């Protein structure tokens, strides 16, 4: 015989403490809630407005350098440690939690051209205008000890960049050529050359760790394999590429920062056209760095702004600028994916939030639930014109705003000219070139 019993769980309707809100039983039947969608739309609109109200991305400025900040490096093991090199040869190590400099050393004569930390975090390498590669201990010298490098390698030419292998005691430098060094030796294990121009930056792939990419001043992006004696292939663009960064989650993808105001995301297997062209800057893009998730990257530009791009979108989701910030030379995305660091001409390193309206600190469970709910609402209604307009709007400095307007007019004029030329030419004589292929000159295997 079956007996039906009413079962009531007190957890469903009794509050845990008398300070809590009374729990209200709810029936989610849509028939009983005919105005659910309009109510949700209003909530989504309010959430979007509040997000823009609370968007205060700038956290602090780390000052102390006496010349422009030229390069930065992240500590591989410590989130709160960052290294920076300046144009006067000075290297500083910063503690981000205290927001102060914990160590200063005079590393080079002239510019510090590049720096990188060893994968274990015990030491770091710097290269400078004085034709030297120096390896330094990460921790400060003991009381009474001299501030001296562990190793110094004197080269024949100026080195313009350096990067360390992600797993082995090997590093690469670039200048007139790309050299692969063993840490124990004073001469390179092997050297790669392709063309005669100087190479501005070199980067190891974080996943396929034997692969390297480099940017040369003759507009080339060259890919190398450490296991081979010759370079793999190169792609020639219309203008010079300043630097590149590999996607930490997808082995074949890298993004290049170019002089023609754009960034290009390439798949190294198909270099004939980029996967995506990212356009928004109004001056040369000087540096790029991926977030640890591989979903977004941050770019620094000569137009005095920092932009955050989703990998699969052609336009930026966020732009950061301040009145005092000058040309941004270098940028880094911290390893916890929460903050962005940028070093600029006027001797400051600035710390920004990666998500402008994110609340820092510990969140109460109800607060977290409300934030998640608002986020879902914003995603649900993101294509409604009113919400889209509010979410997309950014205040820009007058100079950037005017340049964007001017470039839009120029782009339209070029498009009109091309359409007119095609209209008055023999059919097929003026081919339609897609935007992605316009900037590629050639791919050499």
Image (tube, rainbow, N blue to C red):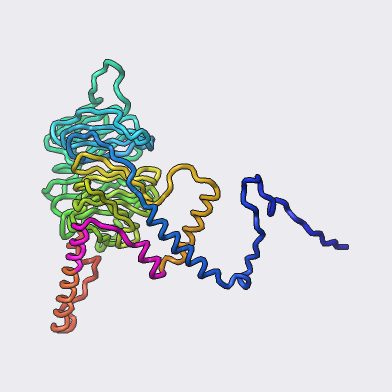
Tell me which residue sits at (31%, 41%) in the image: 60
Q: Is residue 273 something one can see in this rendering? A: yes
The relative height of residue 425 versus residue 95 in the rendered view (above or below) is below
Tell me which residue sits at (25%, 32%) in the image: 92
- The spot of residue 392 in percent (x, y) is 34, 62
Query: Is residue 200 rendered to the left or right of residue 3?
Result: left
Question: What residue span does the magenta drawing correspond to?
Answer: 384-408
> Which quadrant is the N terminus positioned in?
bottom right
Q: Is residue 173 something one can see in this rendering? A: no
Camera-side residue of 310 and 177: 310
Camera-side residue of 325 and 193: 325
Tell me which residue sits at (22%, 46%) in the image: 324
Q: Is residue 402 magenta?
A: yes
- The spot of residue 118 in percent (x, y) is 31, 34
- The spot of residue 6 in percent (x, y) is 79, 59
The relative height of residue 58 versus residue 38 in the rendered view (above or below) is above
């Amino acid at each position: 015989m079956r007996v039906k019993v009413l079962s009531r769980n007190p957890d469903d309707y009794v509050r845990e403490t008398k300070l809590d809100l009374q729990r209200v039983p709810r029936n989610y039947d849509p028939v009983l809630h005919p105005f659910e969608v309009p109510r949700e739309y209003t909530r989504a609109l309010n959430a979007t407005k509040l997000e823009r109200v609370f968007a205060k991305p700038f956290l602090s400025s780390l000052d102390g350098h006496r010349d422009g900040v030229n390069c930065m490096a992240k500590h591989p093991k410590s989130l709160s440690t960052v290294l920076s090199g300046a144009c006067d040869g000075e290297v500083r190590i910063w503690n981000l939690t205290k927001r102060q400099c914990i160590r200063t050393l005079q590393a080079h004569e002239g510019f510090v051209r590049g720096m990188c930390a060893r994968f274990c975090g015990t030491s770091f390498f710097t290269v400078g205008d004085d034709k030297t590669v120096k390896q330094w201990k990460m921790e400060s010298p003991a009381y009474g000890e001299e501030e001296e490098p562990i190793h110094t390698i004197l080269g024949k030419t100026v080195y313009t960049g350096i990067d360390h292998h992600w797993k082995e005691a090997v590093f690469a430098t670039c200048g007139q050529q790309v050299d692969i060094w063993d840490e124990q030796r004073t001469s390179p294990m092997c050297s790669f050359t392709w063309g005669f121009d100087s190479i501005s930056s070199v980067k190891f792939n974080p996943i396929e760790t034997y692969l390297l990419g480099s940017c040369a001043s003759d507009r080339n992006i060259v890919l190398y394999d450490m296991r081979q004696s010759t370079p793999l292939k190169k792609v020639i663009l219309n203008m010079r590429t300043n630097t590149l960064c590999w996607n930490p989650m997808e082995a074949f993808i890298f993004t290049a920062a170019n002089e023609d105001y754009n960034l290009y995301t390439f798949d190294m297997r198909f270099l004939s056209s980029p996967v995506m062209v990212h356009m928004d800057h109004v001056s040369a893009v000087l540096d790029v760095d991926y977030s640890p998730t591989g979903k977004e990257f941050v770019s620094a530009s000569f137009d005095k702004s920092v932009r955050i791009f989703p990998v699969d979108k052609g336009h930026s989701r966020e732009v950061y600028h301040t009145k005092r910030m000058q040309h941004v030379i270098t940028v880094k995305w911290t390893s916890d994916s929460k903050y962005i660091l940028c070093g600029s001409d006027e001797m400051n390193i600035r710390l920004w939030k990666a998500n402008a309206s994110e609340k820092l600190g510990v969140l109460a469970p109800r607060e977290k639930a409300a934030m998640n709910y608002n986020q879902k609402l914003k995603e649900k209604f993101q294509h409604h014109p009113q919400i889209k307009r509010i979410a997309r709007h950014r205040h820009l400095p007058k100079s950037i705003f005017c340049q964007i307007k001017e470039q839009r007019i120029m782009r339209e004029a070029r498009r009109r000219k091309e359409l007119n030329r095609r209209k008055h030419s023999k059919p097929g004589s003026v081919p339609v070139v897609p935007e992605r292929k316009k900037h590629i000159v050639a791919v050499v295997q």
